Every structure is written in structure tokens, then in C-alpha cells.
Image: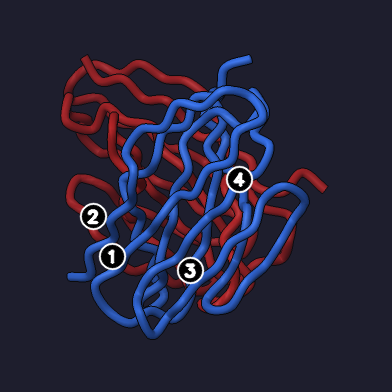
Amino acid sequence: GIQVEQSPPDLILQEGANSTLRCNFSDSVNNLQWFHQNPWGQLINLFYIPSGTKQNGRLSATTVATERYSLLYISSSQTTDSGVYFCAVERYGKLIFGTGTRLQVFP
Amino acid sequence: NAGVTQTPKFRVLKTGQSMTLLCAQDMNHEYMYWYRQDPGMGLRLIHYSVGEGTTAKGEVPDGYNVSRLKKQNFLLGLESAAPSQTSVYFCASSTGRMYEQYFGPGTRLTVT
């Protein structure tokens, strides 16, 4: 089946720093979503981005479907950005999740 | 508009007991999903439904059954719980196959 790999697995930042999270996938996909799982376990939709670039405040995402990767950019990080970031790709109506990037932002 | 809700939030079962998890959505979504999340891993799809009265197997369906008798509800059943089913269970819904999925808050299940 399709493989979804995220890097880095862990990231520690000081407040105000910028970061880039990467998601590689091994086969063509119909769509891709980025999620943030906060420290209380809630999964929050960040982006639905099968291709192209989208921005939402300090966060932006780019998916290059032909090269099978997506990037999530976090600028001017805040402590509330802490948690685990997942990308998930859709194949045949099913979401396949990566193992996530755990982000810790310290004041 | 509550979105996706899950009942209960926490549950402890003994091996061999049965239980049902309830997922409800008020967004009139056709598609609903059940996932499990184990420590250090992403979510894995257990079962899903593409409409009222339909169900289909996902990635890890063994030991679980589901029913979608009403469009807004999706039930996940464990007939004989095993310690390997200790996990956090998430329900999700979407308008259709190519649309983003919205997740409930999760149910933490421990089987002793």
C-alpha cells in the first residue's frame, strides 16, 4: 500500500521561530489534508490541499502532487502551536495517515 | 452546530466484555469513519460508511463491527474486547469522498 512519511519526527522550537514540516507519499493521491492534534487530543483541520499553495494566518501549505510531497510552514511559532502535526492522503475514499511530527514550542 | 460528537469519552473494559461507541454528526454528511490511534502512530481506518445503511472495511477491521442505521449516527461495536483494542478511537465525517474530514474529540478505551 501507499507509504506516507513525515519529517522530522520531533521538533523543538523557541517561540518566534519558523519551521517547515514535510510529508512524502509513495504513490499518486486524490487529496491531502494537514491536521494539528493539540495536547488534549483533538484533531483540527488545517488544510485540504491536493495541490498548490494555501495560507491561513501564520500557517501555509504547499503540495506538489507530481513530486509526491507536501510542506507545512509555520511562521513566528507560538506555544499554542505545540502538538502533533499529521498529514493524511486520500486513496480510494480512505485517508492514510503519516506518523506525525511532534512540535514543542517553548517560551 | 455541534459538529461530530462521540460517546463515551472514556471507558474501561475487562477482557471479553462488549461495548458500543456512538458517533453523531449534525452536518448532514454522507460519509462517516471510525479510526483508532495507538501511541506514536497516526490514525488507522477501522470501518467506514458512504451513506445510510452502508458499511465497509478499512485497514484494521478485525474484532469490530459497525452499523449506520441513521444518516447522522455511526456505531462501532466490540463484541469481545481484547487488550490489543486499548486505544483512542476517533470518528470522522465528510460530505463525500473528495472532501475534507472532520473529527470528533475521541474516546479513550482501556481493556484490562
Q: Which residue is mark 1?
A: B57
Q: Which residue is mark 2?
A: B61
User: Which mark lies nearer to you, 2 or 3?
Assistant: 3
Mark 4–mark 2 distance (CA, rounded to whole Å): 36 Å
Question: How many numbered marks have been drawn onto this rendered protein structure?
Answer: 4
Tell me whether circle 2 and circle 3 mark residues in contact (CB < 8 Å): no
Determine the colour of chain A.
blue
Few, some or many residues within 10 Å of mark 3 (<14, 14–19, 20+): many
Tell me whether circle 1 and circle 2 mark residues in contact (CB < 8 Å): yes
**Direction from residue A89 to residue A18 in the image, left or right:** right
In this rendering, is residue A68 above or below A40?
Answer: below
**Residue type for callout 1:** Lys
Q: Are marks 1 and 2 on the same chain?
A: yes
Few, some or many residues within 10 Å of mark 2 (<14, 14–19, 20+): some
Q: Are marks 2 and 3 on the same chain?
A: no
Percent position of residue B8, x then y: 53, 27
Q: Nearer the viewer, residue A89 or B65?
A: A89
Q: Quadrant of residue B104?
A: top right
Mark 2–mark 3 distance (CA, rounded to whole Å): 23 Å
Chain for mark 3?
A: A
Chain for mark 4?
A: A
Q: Nearer the viewer, residue A19 or B87?
A: A19
**Direction from residue B3 to residue A61 in the image, left or right:** left
User: Which mark lies nearer to you, 4 or 3?
Assistant: 4
Mark 4–mark 3 distance (CA, rounded to whole Å): 18 Å
**Direction from residue B98 to residue A30 in the image, left or right:** left
Q: Are marks 4 and 1 on the same chain?
A: no
Q: Which residue is mark 3?
A: A32
Q: Which residue is mark 4?
A: A74
**Residue type for callout 4:** Ile
**Residue type for callout 2:** Pro
